[in-house]
Image (cartoon, rainbow, N blue to C red):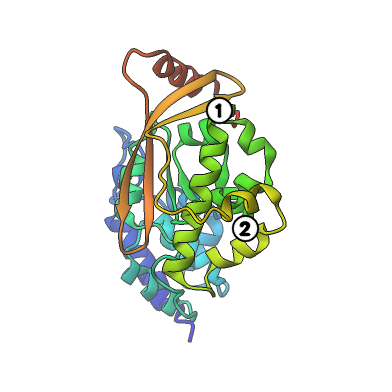
Amino acid sequence: MFDRAGLGAFLRHRRGVLQPEDVGLTRGQRRRTDGLRREEVAALCHLSTDYYARLERGVGPHPSEQIILAIAQGLHLTLDERDHLIRLAGHRPPVRGAASDFVAPGLLRILDRLDDTPAEVVTELGETLQQSPLGIALLGDATQRTGPERALGYRWFTDERLRDAYPPEEREQLSRVYAAGLRELVALRGPASRAARFVALLQDHEAFRRVWDDFEVGLRPPEVKRFLHPAVGALELQCQTLLDPDQSHRLLVYTAVPGSESAEKLQLLAVIGAQPA
């Protein structure tokens, strides 16, 4: 049952307790509002201010599950708060765990503070859920992809342009790494999992079958990641990983050695903006 009044009250409360710095916004000197403004929340949720304001006042239309999930993510809700919001809107909460696209607020708070660093939150299948601005400039806006193409381990074998963004001498090793990762996920999640479905789809690609038939497991990406970016050229970056075990999500942070040529190129990339590799 859709509880309009309850939904509005809950949204007003959550907006009131959130501070700009909690969601990566700058607190202006003239701010007098406790919590966030409606227009700030609307922007975080990718909604119009009028639509969001009507939901808060309890006079808006019945929001879809997709809109409620966007609001929950924008407000940095916990999983329990997300599920409560969904029930107030008359929907059934989605699955938790590895199949969930909902990013925990702790990871979001860290990501919000990484404006000057390439970073992204990915699923265990390599599906990008959130990116920092410099992460988009380095890798392109990966959050807009849909279906199997969202998964890096799938797209590696189906999109030649993706492979072209990496040095030729590393592509074979990366093919083995992605195939081994899919094999491990199929064993972990079972034959009905998305990983298993991706493997079935990839059987049509000879490049995948060649490494899949080697039955390798336990391979890991190189510690230093090398990219060929169309605007700034070759980059050598370290990748630090923070794991959310409840969701099987990973926050990947790409850094360059201070004073290195790659560090200078990252600074240049921050200036020229998004031109994806």
User: Which mark identifies residue 90?
Assistant: none
Label 1 residue SS: helix
Q: Name the amino acid type tagged 1.
A: Glu
The mark nearer the N terminus, 1 or 2, is 2
Q: Is residue 185 left or right of residue 260?
A: right
Toward the bottom, the furthest residue is 1
Find residue 273 and report its image quarter: top right
Residue 37 versus residue 173: which sits nearer the camera? Answer: 173
Rendered location of residue 159, percent (x, y): 68, 43
State if disc 2 and disc 1 touch (CB < 8 Å): no
At horizontal 37% and vertical 14% (from top left) the residue drawn is 260
Coordinates of residue 121 in the picture (x, y in percent): 42, 48
- Residue lying furthest right: 204
Task: Pick whichever, 6 or 201, lies toward us.
Answer: 201
Asked which quadrant contains residue 230, the reply is top right
Determine whether 166 is above or below 76 in the image. above
* Residue at mark 2: 148
Q: Is residue 167 left or right of residue 251?
A: right
* Residue 99 seen: no
Query: Label 1: which residue?
Result: 169
Amino acid at dot 2: Pro
Residue 189 placement: quadrant: bottom left
Work out which quarter of the rendered image holds the C terminus and state it. top right
Q: Position of residue 244 (x, y in %)?
A: 31, 56
171 in relation to 242, above or below: above
* Alpha carbon distance from label 1 to label 2: 26 Å
